[in-house]
Image (spheres, rainbow, N blue to C red):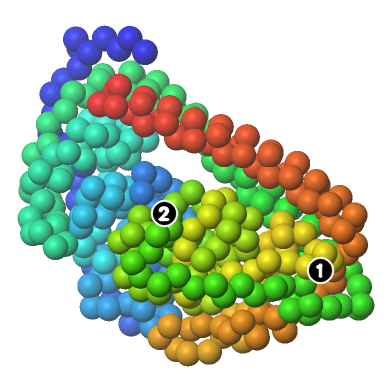
Amino acid sequence: MNIDKSKWTKVKFGDVAIQQKESVDIETTHLNRYIAGEHMDTEDIHLRKWGIVGDGYLGPAFIRKFEKGDVLYGSRRTYLKKVAVADFDGITANTTFVIKANEKIINPKLLPFLMLSDGFTKHSIENSKGSVNPYINWKDIANYEFLLPPKEEQARLAELLWVVDDVGEREKEVKERLSELRLLIIENHLNSSENNMRLGDCLIVKKKKSKAPHSIEKYIGLEHIESGVFFTDNFDNASSVLADSYIFNKGDLLYSKLRPYLDKAIIASFDGICTTELIIYDVNAKSSKEYILNVLHSKKFLDYIVDKSFGTKMPRVSQELVSDFSFYLPTIEEQDDILNELKMITNSINVVSHQLNHCITLKLVLINKIF
């Protein structure tokens, strides 16, 4: 994009954005949805999550009303780039700026993209106050200066950015549908027969310990495993681990018995040691490790294991509870056929993920080219 900015005008953010300060009483308001910080995702202008007023979460800070079309901006830890366009009326905390575009000066559809630009974020970070939980004041953010194109060019650029965003949304939808299909295939097989068996009939527990100081190179803790993933390349230097650990080998199944709702189970792609909060499994000749891993990630198993977990602050499960899970296990040949079907869907998910990442990157490049 070769953009001629010779006719663009230098303005301040306070010229194009109007802070909204209408307050509401959560005890009497007719509004039924609220937005907290965790409902806004980094560099995502869409609201995908929200809370329901009356769920017991709201504190005294939740007094600010927003309307459909308003832009919400997280004023704390602004490096997180939490900017979202509201698609419903609701309530948020007074630490979230509620902003309307000054339509006399800026196209409203362009405003959220301006607020995602590197220049805007840099200014916001540099003018934030505090160290532990830094925040920006409105007067400081209002002083941000940038070049604004004429109105007709604003409309063209806004349309371009929203088209790229829309393509990304469609890719995201396809990815979600493929992921749902993948889960559905496993669920259907788990429930396809009354002739069930226990996971304990397939799994072989491994408990070989390594004592500190460790001679093994790689260490996996719970923090290295993302929820719902099947493999991980994340690890720490094992020599820095002071606690006793379990030894695992490439190809072993690792399952977290702590906070089972986080759905942490992988097949190891390297040799190493791990926290004792992970159970290490091999499998017998009746089953495939990849198939059992899909079982561990299934909704049926997750519902079962969360229901069986014990403890309040830090719920956990035992090896025995995992073993007691009952399910239908196809023959090895059938397992291979199912895995091949799942692999095709996974390959499609990977392709769509690549395209989605490309859309996200393109959008950010365009934003910073414009602003």
Residue 61: quadrant of the picture: bottom left
> Residue at horizontal 51%, vertical 82%?
316
Q: Residue at x 55, y 63 (%)?
A: 248
Q: Residue at x 36, y 73 (%)?
A: 243
Residue 180: image tag: none
Q: Is residue 143 above or below residue 233?
A: above
242 left or right of 183? Answer: left
Residue sitting nearer the eye, 263 or 268: 268
Query: Is 134 situated left or right of 305 in this image?
Result: left
Residue hosting label 2: 217
Note whether 115 is above or below 106 in the view shown. below
Whether residue 59 can be seen here: yes
Q: How many marks?
A: 2
* Residue 89 location (% of width, % of height): 40, 60
Judged by depth in the image, the label closer to the viewer, 1 or 2, is 2
Cβ atoms at labels 1 and 2 below 8 Å apart: no
Q: Amino acid at mark 2?
A: Glu
Name the amino acid type tagged 1: Leu
The residue singled out by tag 1 in the image is: 190
